[in-house]
Image (tube, rainbow, N blue to C red):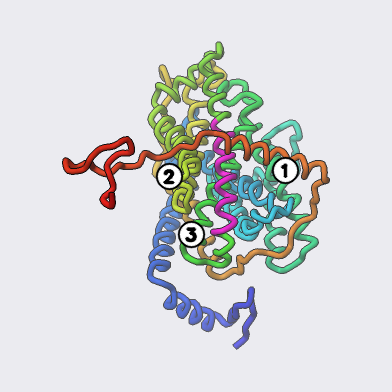
Amino acid sequence: MILVRVHGRPVPLDPRQAWRAIRTDIAAMPRALKAWLLLLLLLMAIGAIGAVRALFPGDKGIATTPTVEWGLLIVGYVFFAITTSGLCLASSLGTVFGIDRFRPLEKRHAVLAVLCLVTAFGVIALDLHFPVRMVFGAVFNPAPASPMWWMGVFYAAYLGSLLVEVWSIFWHHPRIHQWSCLSSSVIAVVAPLTLGAVFAVLEARAFWHGLFTPLHMVAAAYVSGVAVLAIVFYLVGRLRLVGWERGVAVAQPAIRGLLGLGLAVLSLLVARQLFSGLTSSDAGLSSATRLLLTGPLAPEYFGVRLLGGLTIPLLLIALPRTRTPRGLLVAGLLAIIGVFVDRLTFVEAGQLAPVTTVSGVVSAPFAAYSPSPVEIAIVVGGIALVAFLYTLAERYLDLSESETHVMIWMPRWAVHGFATAAGAARRAVGALPRFRWPRRRPAVTADEPIGADGPAEAAD
């Protein structure tokens, strides 16, 4: 029998031996893991059926219309793409700047980033129907004046950089890994900016148009990536996976701080967006804002986006009683759901309330859009695909912390400045009055005397 070794595991090349090894490994799996993988396979099968249904030419499986041309598949593409950027932005603090508490994120972020970006490309390919035309058009007919062309260029370069990063970290090429981490971290900022610019340059869609749209995209990317890492590292600690000791002691507190910072910044951007919409004289912007606050999108925007996706996660991170691994898990789950709904309502609000003939003819006062079962199946199947492949990566790859760290050393004045600012912030937070939960006092009986300090102790 011919064997090859992949990360220390013998893999037979003979198909019969390989199938026998797979069956043996499946039999050795815990029952909970088998059930989890079976559930993901079922969801992936549903997604595959939806994907095949979406490819039929002229089919009505996709619920978009001439008025609402960008639907749930565009939202899914944006969500997976920005999550990739957020993963790299969070991990770059360890991979690029060498901060010790963020180094446990390195391998897991790279695997997740590749899976999310490949899934994003798959979702957008199904929406385009003929993505090969786009590839050849971008190569042979470049359009440097178009943000969409630059988006394709940067995300293609991003995928290449991530693949080199994963190859170099698992096959131990330190120098190549250093440069690939640096390039991935730079593109992780530029790519969502260009993705946001695709929306921001559309003057006919007042809700999308403007400088803050790309900045909002980067902030949402950061929160989404950190929220995924919060979920992953809770499971690493809970299931005692590779590197769980440092994952619990070092990575989880670091992720908690990153998530709190990202949610605070994103809250400010959301508040600015709402204030601008409510005070604007632009009919398109004000009508889109009313659509979110009092129109058909209000329940999901208020309940899921503002309350569930921002307010509750911030409270879970801020309150001492919920600063626990389980609290971080709930905050991460709510935050990532909030980001998805944020991108969904962003895409919908920009199209459901146009006011000019340039942006489309709509029914008064708003147009209507509901994702079709095909679109929902594709997005759910994409999420299941990422979860399935990452579960296999946790089981079969060596995701222990790498010893290779990158090449950027900050100058002394910058280090001193960051230390000074961090110390000032810590003192300012320490000076704030601490919130304490009210304690339940013991009940007073008729036989106990009541003094200034409450019921007398039994020993007295």
Q: In this rendering, would 102 be left or right of 320?
A: right
Observer-side mark, 3 or 1, equals: 1
- Depth order, front residue of 452/394: 452
| Residue that mark 1 sits on | 419
Q: Write the start and end of the magenta stretch as one range.
A: 248-267
User: SS class of the residue under badge 3?
Assistant: helix
Q: In this rendering, would 366 be left or right of 70?
A: left
Q: Tell me: residue 144, above or below residue 39.
A: above
* Disc 2 residue type (three-letter): Ile
| Residue that mark 3 sits on | 235
| Residue that mark 2 sits on | 376
Q: Residue at x 71, y 40 (%)?
A: 190
Decide whether residue 253 is among the magenta residues: yes
Of all residues, the one furthest to the top in this rendering is 281
| Whole-number angstrom distance, CA of label 2 to CA of label 3 | 26 Å
Q: In this rendering, would 384 be left or right of 200?
A: left
Quarter of the image where the N terminus is located: bottom right
* Residue 239 visible in the snapshot: yes
| Whole-number angstrom distance, CA of label 3 to CA of label 1 | 32 Å
Q: Upstream in the sequence, badge 3 or badge 1?
A: 3
